[in-house]
Image (tube, rainbow, N blue to C red):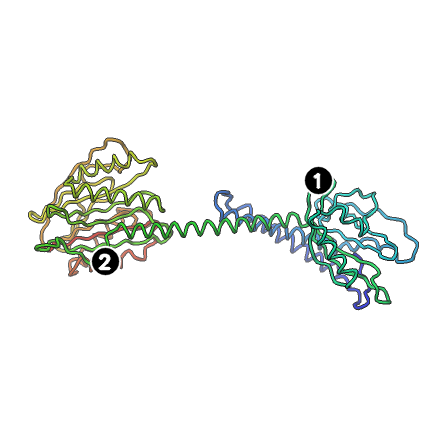
Amino acid sequence: MPSHLSADRPAAQPPGRGSVDALISQTRRLKGDVDAVRRDAPSDDADPQERWQRALYDLALHQLSDLDAHLAQLRDGPPPVPAAAGAEPAARTAPPAPRRGSLLSRVGSAEWNLLTDEASWSGELYEILGRDRTAPPLTLDELPALVLDEDKPKLTVMVTDCLVDAQRIDGEFRVVRPDGEVRTVHMMGEPVLAADGSTASMWAVLRDVSELRRSERAVSETRDSLQRHRQRAQSEHRLAVELQEAVLPPWRGSLRLPHQGAETLDLAAHCLPSSSSALIGGDWYDALELADGETLLSVGDLTGHGVAVASGMATLLGAVRGMAMAGTQPGQLMALLNQLLDATVQPALGSAVCCRYRPQTRTLVWAQAGHPAPLLFRGGTGRRLHSPDGVLLGATSGAVYAQAEETLEPGDLLLLHTDGLVPGRDNAAAVNRLLDLAPRFEGARTAQDCVRTVVEEFGETEREDHACVLIAKVTS
């Protein structure tokens, strides 16, 4: 719009063409950079975080495109000046058509002369409102005919405040184009005062902000979706933690078994959290005194994370305890666990080691299902026990699991662990680092001291998953 001389302010001087061209170049470079980053961003619509990021990229591009168009209008100058009040109307000049590739149709201007009841629209405003450029512009009384019924009071208040109280206009309303499309228009304007202080005309800049508002709604909706996703994840995490804490042995520090009679085992355990995921996995450890005086030792891992996996782990651990209490030997116990997983509605895979320790003979009977073998430390050195045959739980129906026996001696240290202690779940690397701790284990007084040594060694490791360690020291 042309600069008007109002009663209370002089006309602003337009910036130099060279400075505007420089701003346009900077804007277009920035728009290209943002678009390149947007194209390289992941496009997984199932991930609310990525949907939110892409919506923000789209919103930034819309705003930069609008800025480019506004600067181009500023560089090219205002449209023709309308006839002054009381003068003979000049021959109406057809507004220039928008240039190809620009967004000039997104911003238009208008002036309504209150003395002659004439209106003057820029060609861009015709484009925004979808009206024929050969048709006369609408007066202020006719303009509400384009506006949605629910937004008409808002437009009436804005125009009345401007004309009566000389207030500036800054608001939005929705219009219905002749093709039925609804567009959101943001109007900014102010009155132009005559010499006597009365309102002579009203001018305004009208901007089509439909795409911008859609982008903002998309950002808001994806932000809300992301917030709901985070809240749901936090709730599931709390539930999984509570379930894990309720199922795993309640003892902290060392546990000595049996509770009655001479103590034969000093036990301690620890669960090392993942460094890359807050989700609870399906790892477990357990030590349980059995009715016949023997001791059950077990560790295992159910694949996956979250509440469902923690619930599945609780089911498996409950089954292990129940069958061990009933006298089921480790090999048969693994076969029954495999059947249990095979019969579940949702397929799952798991690994486990199950041991029964007989204190009278210091004999360890054990079986494994696709799990790292226990490590035996004696006299300052360590070795991995030879694994009996056994496939992953849930991998195949009717699997048979062999058993192995090992005679322990007073002072021996038995270490059971789940994989995941080191990055990449590299069990060979984890076993080598554990075996290197043998001299430090030899100097430790209790099983709890040995667990602290393991935590010191692996506590700062960048693990992709949780890992559990169970240590049993033979005391007599």
Residue 407 appears in view: no
- For label 2, the crowd category at 10 Å Cα-Cα, with few meaning under 14, some 14 to 19 and many 20 or more, is few
| Tag of residue 252 | 2
Considering depth in this image, is 430 or 118 the residue closer to the camera?
118
Query: Residue type at mark 2?
Result: Arg
Classify the position of the N terminus by image quarter: bottom right
At 81% from the left and 62% from the top, the residue drawn is: 192
The answer to whether 459 is drawn above or below residue 183 in the figure is: below
The answer to whether 393 is drawn above or below residue 460 in the figure is: above
Can you name the residue that lies furthest to the right here?
A: 88
Q: Is residue 121 left or right of residue 226?
A: right
Q: Is residue 3 left or right of residue 238?
A: right
Can you give x and y, in whole percent of width and height, for residue 158 in the image?
73, 57
Q: Secondary structure at mark 1?
A: loop
Q: Secondary structure at mark 2?
A: loop
Residue 175 appears in view: yes
Considering depth in this image, is 243 or 7 the residue closer to the camera?
243
Classify the position of the C terminus by image quarter: bottom left
Q: Which residue is mark 1?
A: 180
Query: Residue type at mark 1?
Result: Gly
Q: CA distance from mark 1 to mark 2?
A: 70 Å
At 79% from the left and 64% from the top, the residue drawn is: 11
- For label 1, the crowd category at 10 Å Cα-Cα, with few meaning under 14, some 14 to 19 and many 20 or more, is few
At 40% from the left and 51% from the top, the residue drawn is: 235
Can you give x and y, in whole percent of width and height, for residue 266 in the image?
15, 56
At 14% from the left and 41% from the top, the residue drawn is: 327
Considering depth in this image, is 47 or 97 the residue closer to the camera?
47
